[in-house]
């Protein structure tokens, strides 16, 4: 019969604290980089959606002979030459949940302006809050 005591070895409190501190330091170095990538990808998503809108708007113009007065006309139309819908799904919001801005006629002699107000949902701004325009 084994009469010896079994020794269970675990981690000491100081060892656990050291591991927690190391994980915290790693997290503080990695997290800012990852969050900046998220904001950058949201701006790229908005630009890609604007490009899709531009294609739909150009196709609408080819069929009807003019650009629509409202983006909703890309989904539903009453004109005899309307051959839509020109967007496969409902009109999306920008990556921050705001409506895209569409103005016809556009500024500087352009046929229309199409843009996102950026992260803050307000005109103007800098960095992530900057408006994203069609080119």
Image (spheres, rainbow, N blue to C red):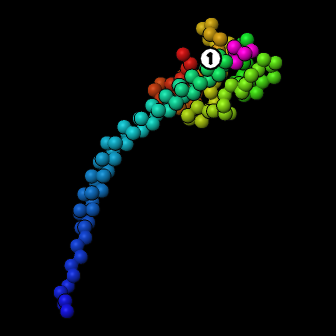
Viewer-proximal residue among 76 and 124: 76
In which quadrant of the rendered view does residue 87 lie?
A: top right
Q: Give the quadrant of the C terminus.
A: top right
Viewer-proximal residue among 107 and 135: 135
Position of 125 relative to 112 (above/below)? below
At horizontal 41% and vertical 35% (from top left) the residue drawn is 36
In which quadrant of the rendered view does residue 118 lie?
A: top right
Q: Position of residue 43 (x, y in %)?
A: 50, 29
Q: Position of residue 41 (x, y in %)?
A: 47, 32
Magenta stretch in the rendered image: 60-64
Q: Secondary structure at mark 1?
A: strand
Queried whether the magenta region covers residue 119, the answer comes back as no
Q: How many marks?
A: 1
**What main secondary structure does the magenta stretch of the protein show?**
helix
* Residue 53 visible within the image: yes
In which quadrant of the rendered view does residue 76 lie?
A: top right
Position of 108 relative to 52 (above/below)? above
In the image, farthest residue toward the bottom:
1
Q: Position of residue 68 (x, y in %)?
A: 72, 18
Q: Which residue is mark 1?
A: 113
Q: Position of residue 82 (x, y in %)?
A: 76, 20
Question: Left or right: where does residue 36 sit relative to residue 1?
Answer: right
Q: Give the quadrant of the N terminus.
A: bottom left
Question: Left or right: where does residue 13 sit relative to residue 56?
Answer: left
At horizontal 51% and vertical 25% (from top left) the residue drawn is 130
Viewer-proximal residue among 134 and 88: 88
Question: Left or right: where does residue 31 sit relative to residue 2?
Answer: right
């Amino acid at each position: 019969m084994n009469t010896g005591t079994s020794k269970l070895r675990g981690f000491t409190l100081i060892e656990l604290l050291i591991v927690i501190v190391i994980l915290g330091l790693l997290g503080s170095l990695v997290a800012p980089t990852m969050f900046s990538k998220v904001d950058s990808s949201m701006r790229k998503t908005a630009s890609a959606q604007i490009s899709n809108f531009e294609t739909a708007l150009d196709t609408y113009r080819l069929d009807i002979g003019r650009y629509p007065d409202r983006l909703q006309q890309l989904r539903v139309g009453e004109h005899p030459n309307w051959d839509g819908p020109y967007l496969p799904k409902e009109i999306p919001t920008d990556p921050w949940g705001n409506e895209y801005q569409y103005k016809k006629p556009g500024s500087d002699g352009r046929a229309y302006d199409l843009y996102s107000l950026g992260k803050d949902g307000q005109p103007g701004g800098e960095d992530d809050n900057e408006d994203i325009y069609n080119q």
